[in-house]
Image (cartoon, rainbow, N blue to C red):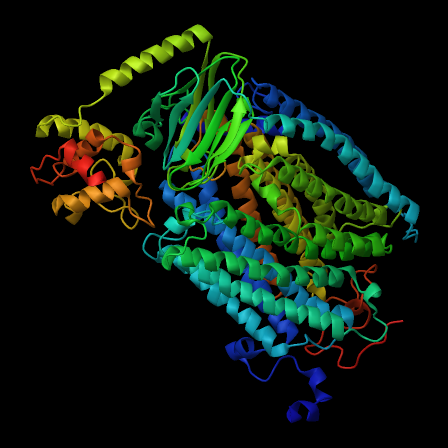
Amino acid sequence: MTNRKVNGTGAVLLALSGAAEAAYQWNLPAPVTRVASEIYNLHLVMMGIILVIFVGVFGVMFYSIYAHRKSVGHKAEHFHENITVEIIWAIIPFLILIAVAWPATKTILNLKDTASPDITIKVTGYQWKWGYDYLKGEGEGIAFLSNLSTPQDQITGNAPKGEHYLLEVDNRMVVPVNKKVRVLITASDVIHAWMVPAFGVKQDAIPGFVRDSWFRAEKEGIYRGQCAELCGKDHGFMPIVVEVLSAEKYTAWVAEQKKKIAAAADDPNKKWNLADLKARGEKVYAVNCVTCHQANGQGVKGAFPALDGSQLANGPRGRHIEIVLNGKRGTTMAAFGKQLSDTDIAAVITYERNAWSNRTGEVIQPGEIGSARK
Amino acid sequence: MSAVIDSGHARDEHAQGPYGGIMRWITTTNHKDIGTLYLWFSFTMFLVGGTLALAIRAELFQPGLQFWHPEFFNQLTTMHGLIMVFGAIMPAFVGFANWQVPMMIGAPDMAFARLNNWSFWLLPVGALLLVGSFFVPGGATAAGWTIYAPLSTQMGPGMDFAIFALHIMGASSIMGSINIITTILNMRAPGMTLIRMPLFVWTWLITAYLLIAVMPVLAGAITMLLADRHFGTSFFNAAGGGDPVMFQHIFWFFGHPEVYIMILPGFGIISQVIPAFSRKPLFGYSSMVYATASIAILSFIVWAHHMFTVGMPTAGILFFMYATVLIAVPTGVKVFNWLTTMWRGSMSFETPMLFAVGFIFVFTMGGFTGLILAIMPIDIQLQDTYYVVAHFHYVLVAGSLFSLFAGFYFWVPKWTGRMYDETLGKWHFWLSMIFFNVTFFPMHFLGLAGMPRRIPDYALQFAEFNEIASIGAFGFGLSQILFLWITLKVTVFGRGEKAGQRPWEGADTLEWTHLPSPAPYHSFHEQPVVG
């Protein structure tokens, strides 16, 4: 870290002297869809126009500052109106604007055209993760949640940061190359925004409404983005990772996912013992609960309540189940009933009621969650 | 009232009102006293908001979480925005209006002197609620200064404090605006026709109308929010038949004119300073007035360009994009007029002129990035990234704040009768200018690379530019301590050489031509005749 500090100081000097370094990214990321390339070029054209105006306007200004100074004895002239000049410099910018509005309009029509997709995927924003449901096309029926996979130790500085720090997830969204993918975007709690710069896609995810966007990735690879709309505490910690595969590899991925789904399907009527269910619950807790209620169950004072020794986790189980299933209105406590299976919810509640100093000894069976849902 | 009439003549020699000490300030109905109160209040809030900004930049100096929990970081960004917009920039311009509008139109005071007192004294109450919300359970609101629902319905009591603070500050703004409009329309000296008014007065007249039009809209939005939070309504909750996006439409219908509320009086100040130091009349006076009015009118039909990524219908996107780029035309006219005013003038570069020229240079850059952001497909890439942060700091810091600095250095000789320290003033300009750009220029690149705003931690690819920005921010912050010293020196300590009635030879408005420095406590008891 100390090295980085030294580098930082050096970097300032470098940047000020105008020298470039490999780590600096000066422009939009390399586009991999047609829309993104159009945007990339539109931006270049705009920058060109701006550069010309900049040089013209400030050339005049700095020349004037140089030549028309009192200290060099320049005497002020007294003209203060010229209608012709004023009309000209209102009309010229107007014409320039029309010239750039035209290609921009074409790109807008293109990026709003979500018709006839090959694959349709629903993307749901949660506080603070993304959910992907493959609705139509190859892969239909696949559904998973995608959580940040960067370990807490790296964030708090107790471990060196990895290459894709904060831009890595446990389950990537996977799509085939050169296929039109329509994304239906929504949210379950507050507004999020799904953004993948290389695709030229950014769409707000609005709770209660479905919006759409689309992309056709022309190059295989892994593309990263982040939630772009402030959505609460972990807004900075819900990245988006999309893996673009060849058609064959995508088919293989779909088959593998289907197998996993079949294997992972839990029998909702299975009777679990305390140790197994608690172990599973600990994993569910680590993914869904830990950022607020903390690994030690102490929460964050004033913001997120403690579970360790709490009335909720030691009192009647019905209330505990209800809160986890339906959330708490007016707080960030989400309704996990919409996100997790009966078994996972049963597991996490069992864990919370038997972890830390909580010793209820109760085992909440998945069936109990199923009946609480009704 | 009879006492006032009896002592009518002697009043000109009063240095202050009937009370001394703190009561002078609490009971004052004098436009100069109230202007001073506004300016000190806004400066205090500027330092508070600036401290929050430094807390933000400290966390962002390096990747990883070093100082703050993410939720506290969100409180910092939110409160920095709210305090700077409602506590620093807006009241500062009202302070300038209080001091300058009566003197520039030849009026003895503001039209409603007691209302004026109340408009000001509401502000500390609002500020106390706003800043005090840091100390309530759960802390201050962390929903961003835009307080988008439904995130803002999730917040703790800090959100309610902010809502009430905004209500109070909004009421203050509306009363202040009514006062300014009435003063300008009714109390001008004989011969001071509307089309002869100094541009600063014109821009404030237009700004005051904007304020009256949109502050109630903000009040409506936050009241609906309050009802959603506590009274079970569902204005912004889809589950109850509401729409979260409706909040954004209402908010930005206020928010976009608000942007111009924070810059038009700045345009006015620059339009006074540039001719004064070019020793040449303002070029295109009437086109400046028309351009200001056009910007104000356009500001009501462009709000949804803040919402290009919510998923509007194509027709809506096209309308708002076309309307937005149109604003470049009147704004361009203004910049061209300022340059032509400088052209073939006889310029000197005292601190006010430095800030004015600096304003034109950096504000125009903010205008350029505004044009980039107005092009909707490009905005898709840049919306909610650091590019937007860079853009609005170029227009609000380099725009509003630098124009305020220019105005302060320009008029402080008239207010205090003493010249500020010119050497320190120049240092203040150059340090502010350089560190401002070191702070905010790299943010354009961060935004292009895709770094979202309002995040407490970031991927390693963003590290270098963030480091530079943080160093610049601390430099900029410390430079303002210098400004505090310059201000204290010339106002409170009364040091600096005595200023003549007209220390700037090119300044030709009434306060320079008709009033001594410092301007007497009661000025223009007899109206001057403008001819």
Residue for point 67% across, 23% down: A41
Quarter of the N terminus of chain B within the rendering? bottom right
Residue B253's place in the image compared with A102, above or below, is: below
Quarter of the C terminus of chain B within the rendering? bottom right
The answer to whether residue B335 is visible is: yes
Q: Which of A53 and A351 is in front in this view?
A: A351
Residue for point 57% across, 38% down: B312
Q: In this view, does B376 lie to the left or right of B328?
A: left
Q: Position of residue B291 (x, y in %)?
A: 78, 52
Q: Quadrant of residue A28?
A: top right
Residue for point 38% across, 25% down: A133
Residue for point 55% across, 42% down: B475
Residue B414's place in the image compared with A304, above or below, is: below
Q: In which quarter of the image is residue B374?
A: top right
Q: Which of A128 and B272 is in front in this view?
A: A128
Q: Quadrant of residue A340?
A: top left
Residue B378's place in the image compared with B224, above or below, is: above
Q: Position of residue B268 (x, y in %)?
A: 73, 57
Q: Which of B323 and A54 is in front in this view?
A: B323
Q: Where is residue B432 in the image (x, y as percent from the top left)?
A: 62, 45
Residue B375's place in the image compared with B528, above or below, is: above
Q: Is residue B29 left or right of residue A251?
A: right
Q: Nearer the viewer, residue B188 or A32?
A: A32
